[in-house]
Image: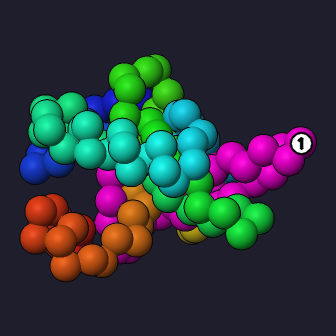
Amino acid sequence: MKIDLIDGKGRGVIATKQFSRGEFVVEYHGDLIEITDAKKREALYAQDPSTGCYMYYFQYLSKTYCVDATRETNRLGRLINHSKCGNCQTKLHDIDGVPHLILIASRDIEAGEELLYDYGDRSRASLEAYPWLKH
């Protein structure tokens, strides 16, 4: 996989090999934190829009967690862009009792395709702030 500049989106991730439907693509990696800490971080990030916000909330064993991938790293999962018709989907994967978010191919993906998944956020506030979530 490689990072590329995508018109109208900024950075994105391009497949450099073929992926078969159901195949592991990449982990959405970052700090695993509970919702109270996540909300505090999100408020801090909102004070500086240039920081961006790469937070993925999910339920695991009746608790809400977040993977905060906002900090710049060499991990590629955080740079996969949104599409309602994506070619990847997230899946919760338990490793020794610790949840990990992984992206798997939701269909066969050819080398050269941009990797995309549906962020799933349809809230009014998010759609107003990020109109690209509609697509």
Say which residue appears at 39% left-offset and 64% top-offset: 119
Q: Is residue 21 or residue 39 the one in the foreground?
A: 39
Image-based side of 107 in relation to 91, left or right: left
* Residue 89 colored in magenta in the image: yes
Indicate whether 106 appears above or below 23. below
> Magenta segment, principal secondary structure?
strand
Residue 20, x across and y down, in percent = 65, 57
Tag 1: amino acid: Asp
Q: Secondary structure at mark 1?
A: loop
Residue 121, x across and y down, in percent = 34, 71
* Residue 51 colored in magenta in the image: no
Residue 102, x across and y down, in percent = 63, 50
Mark 1 = which residue? 96
Image-based side of 29 in relation to 124, left or right: right
Say which residue appears at 12% left-offset and 46% top-offset: 7
- Whether residue 91 appears in this view of the structure is yes
Q: Which residues are magenta?
A: 80-104
Q: Is residue 110 or residue 34 the one in the foreground?
A: 34
Q: Quadrant of the C terminus?
A: bottom left
Dot 1 alpha-carbon crowd within 10 angstroms: few under 14, some 14 to 19, many 20 or more = few
